[in-house]
Structures are given as C-alpha cells and as structure tokens.
Amino acid sequence: MYQVIGITKTLYYYAVTCLGIFLLLNYQDMSTLVAGPVMDLRRPVTSAVGIGAALFYLLGQTFLFVWLCKLPFICKIFPPIDGEWDMKLQSNWGIKQKWLGQGDGSSLYIVEGKVKIKARLFNVKMEFVGTDGYSESKTISVSVRPSDQTGLLDLNYMFINYTRVPVATDTNQHTGAARVFVKESGTGLIMEGTYFTDRKWTEGLNTAGLVTFTRPHAG
C-alpha cells in the first residue's frame, strides 16, 4: 500500500518520525548532546531509529493498519480494502465455447467466488476460492497505485490459479493478471476492472473479461 504515496514520501515520514522520537526522548539533554562529541549521539539516534521502526511495524504491518485505514482522513489515502469480498468474473469463455461448438456465444461466462484480501502498509495478499469449488487462486504480486489517467487508485495484481480436476479445455495451473479501480459507491467501496489469463494459450483458449469486487451483504 505504500505505493499510494511512493517510497520517497514513505522514507520521509519515517525520518520525521525518528526525528520526533529523538527530540522527545532527549529534549532535556539536547544542549549537552549538541555540544558534546558526535559519538555521544550514536546511542540516542540508534534508539530513536529502533523505536521508529517498531512503531512503523506496529502501525503498518499488524491489524492496527486495518483500523487506521478506516479513519476518515486516512481512508482517503489508504482505502480500507482489507477483508472479505464477493468477486464476480464475466469471462469471454462463452464466446470461445462457440468456437468449440459448445454454445451459441450469446453471453459472457460467469464465475463467482470469495476473495480474502490482507492489506498492510508494505504488502498486500489476495486469495480467491470459487463458489463451485472448481478452482482457487493466490496472488504473486499486488500493488496499489494512483492512476494518472482516471484519478482513481489502481489495484494491480498477478495471480496463479490452481484447478485440481480440470475439464478438457482447462489446465491444472495457469497465471493471470488484473487491473481494477477502487471506487466509492453508495454502500462503500467497490473495485472493478479487467483481467486476462494465459490458460492454454497455445491452443487459443486463454481468457479475459471483467472482474468486480463488492462487499458481502450483511445478514
């Protein structure tokens, strides 16, 4: 998630945090430290850096980050995407089935399932399980970045899909990628965009389509 503000700003905020901790811990002895040998600064500086790192870890890599992302100001910078989502895929597989003589290609092929997102400051992980249990996916890499084209946040990810007992037109494993936009709706956040896979690409059976994430309805 740090990609939202960039590595430069992330390091800047870390440095400011360490400086603030250093001043807070040593404000009574500041004149002595400044007037003394440079080596006398080593221990207080090391302590400030260590405490700053621990603070960044607690606030950025634990459940506290999930809570922070729900605060009114923070959520505008880091969207609260952590948790469970309903995912709907609308694939072009229906069209390809027509090529195979298995349908009329009049509609998109629908796949639904659940996605669990674990979002932290320095990493995001996603796992998908289809409602029918046919396949599941795990992400290889995920990034969240501002889009210069739309002004929205992009959730970009690559994934590996696993299918234990594939049909003849499928494979046990394939990779894919998606780019979805994080948007606000009347009921909260939604994410939608496009995806594609390399599933049996040598036979022209790779797929692409629309993907939509919505929060599960309560009750």
Image (tube, rainbow, N blue to C red):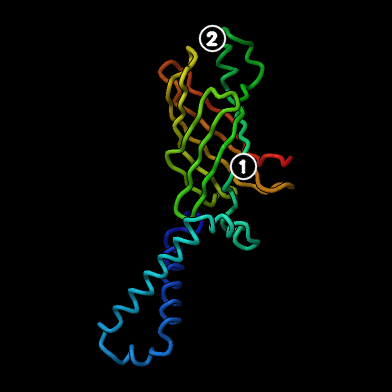
Between residues 80 and 217, which one lies in front from this camera angle? 217
Where 163 falls versus 178 (above or below)?
above
Where is residue 124 drawn, in percent x and y? 48, 47
Residue at numbered disc 1: 191
Kindly identify the amino acid type of the residue bearing the numbered disc 2.
Leu
Q: Considering the image in quadrants, where does the C terminus appear?
A: top right
Q: Distance between the residues labelled 1 and 2?
A: 32 Å
Mark 2: few/some/many CA within 10 Å (<14, 14-19, 20+): few
- SS under mark 1: strand
Q: Are marks 1 and 2 in contact (CB under 8 Å)?
A: no
Q: How many labels does the image show?
A: 2
Residue at the front extreme of this rendering: 219
> What residue is at 60 percent from the left and 27 percent from the top?
131
Image x and y of residue 117, in percent: 54, 43
Picture coordinates of residue 47, whole percent (x, y)? 36, 74
The mark closer to the camera, 1 or 2, is 1
Taking depth in this image into account, of 30 and 15 the one nearest to the observer is 30
Q: Which mark is residue 114?
A: none
In the rendered structure, which amino acid carries the disc numbered 1? Met
Compared to 71, does 99 lie above or below? above
Q: In this view, does 127 lie above or below 39?
A: above
**Circle 1 crowding by C-alpha within 10 Å: few under 14, some 14–19, many from 20:** many
Q: Is mark 2 on a helix, strand or loop?
A: loop
Which residue, given by chain and number where applicable, does mark 2 sit on? 100
- Viewer-nearest residue: 70 or 146: 70
Q: Earlier in the sequence, mark 1 or mark 2?
A: 2
At 43% from the left edge and 15% from the top edge, which residue is drawn?
A: 203
Q: Residue 190: x percent and y percent?
A: 65, 43
Residue 22 picture quarter = bottom left
